[in-house]
Image (spheres, rainbow, N blue to C red):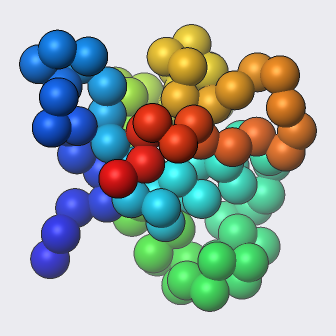
Amino acid sequence: MTSSVREHPSAGRAGRPALSPLAADVLAGIAAGYSTGSLAGRLVLSVRGVEYHCSRLMRLLKAANRAEMIARAYTAGILSADEWPPRVGEEFIH
């Protein structure tokens, strides 16, 4: 099984994480305020699938909860602060 969240191949230089398109959609959905259940329906995932991606994202961003995860994603530039709905920058998606 491949990971949905991993270090970018150039992480040594840029230190930026690489997200799968699905993990990026989960992060953007949580940032937009969708509940786990509604996000699962929108992404055609199980609730456990959304929870799995969320926990991997929280570990990657060293966040204790979802709110901190989103705050850290904005701070790191993964999510753009100047658009709605939130989306993950293309440079973070592999």
47 or 90, nearer to the observer = 90
Q: Residue at x 63, y 31 (%)?
A: 79
In the visual, does 32 lie left or right of 3? right
In the visual, does 76 lie left or right of 35? left
- Say above or below: 66 vs 33: above
Q: Residue at x 38, y 28 (%)?
A: 61
Q: The N terminus appears in which quarter of the rendering?
A: bottom left
The location of residue 9, given as percent across then percent down, is 15, 38
Residue 12 visible within the image: yes
Residue 51 visible within the image: no
Q: Number of callouts in the render? A: 0
Name the quadrant containing residue 45. bottom right
- Say above or below: 77 vs 90: above
The location of residue 22, given as percent across then percent down, is 49, 66
Q: Residue at x 72, y 83 (%)?
A: 41
In the visual, does 16 lie left or right of 31? left
The location of residue 55, given as percent across then percent down, is 39, 51
Q: Residue at x 43, y 39 (%)?
A: 92
The location of residue 62, given as percent across then percent down, is 34, 25
| Farthest-out residue, right | 84
Name the quadrant containing residue 83. top right
- Say above or below: 4 vs 31: below
